[in-house]
Amino acid sequence: MSSVARVTTITVRSEKSFEDAVAIGIERAAQTLRHVSGAWVKEQKVEATEGKITAWSVVLEVSFVLD
C-alpha cells in the first residue's frame, strides 16, 4: 500500500520548555490535521528578560498523511 504525506510549518511558544512547545504544537496540529505522523524541529529560540529565559519557541515541520 502506498501513501502520500504533506508537510506544514507551524510556530509554537511555551513558557515552560522546548519539549512543552513541541508537545503543544503536535497536539494542536492533530486537532486540525488528520493522520499527523511526525514532526521535525526546524528552529529553536528563546526569549529572555534581564538575562533570564522567559519563553521557548520552536518552528515545526509537521507531517501528515493525506486521505
Image (spheres, rainbow, N blue to C red):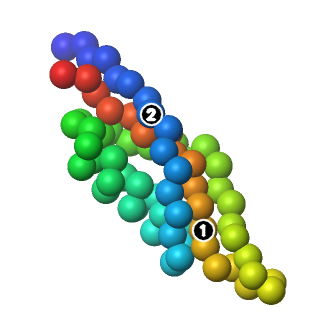
Few, some or many C-alpha atoms within 10 Å of disc 1 (few <14, some 14-19, many ≥20)?
Answer: many
Q: From the image, which quarter does the N terminus lie in?
A: top left
Q: Is residue 37 above or below residue 49?
A: above
- The tag earlier along the polypeptide, 2 or 1, is 2
Q: Secondary structure at mark 1?
A: strand
Q: Position of residue 22 (x, y in %)?
A: 46, 58
Marks 2/1: CA distance? 20 Å
Q: Residue at x 59, y 61 (%)?
A: 57
Q: Residue at x 81, y 84 (%)?
A: 51
Q: Position of residue 31 (x, y in %)?
A: 24, 49
Checking the image for residue 8, the label placed there is 2
Few, some or many C-alpha atoms within 10 Å of disc 2 (few <14, some 14-19, many ≥20)?
Answer: few
Q: Residue at x 69, y 79 (%)?
A: 53
Q: Residue at x 40, y 61 (%)?
A: 23
Q: Position of residue 19 (x, y in %)?
A: 49, 66
Taking depth in this image into account, of 18 and 32 the one nearest to the observer is 32
Horizontal placement of 24 versus 45: left or right? Answer: left
Q: Position of residue 66 (x, y in %)?
A: 25, 23
Q: From the image, which quarter does the C terminus lie in?
A: top left
Q: Is residue 7 above or below residue 54?
A: above
The answer to whether mark 2 and mark 1 are in CB contact below 8 A is no
Amino acid of disc 2: Thr
Taking depth in this image into account, of 11 and 63 the one nearest to the observer is 11
Horizontal placement of 50 versus 14: left or right? Answer: right
Horizontal placement of 8 versus 48: left or right? Answer: left
Q: Is residue 10 above or below residue 20?
A: above
Give residue 24's quadrant in the image.
bottom left
Q: Secondary structure at mark 2?
A: strand
Checking the image for residue 40, the label placed there is none
Give residue 65's quadrant in the image.
top left
Residue at image mark 1: 56
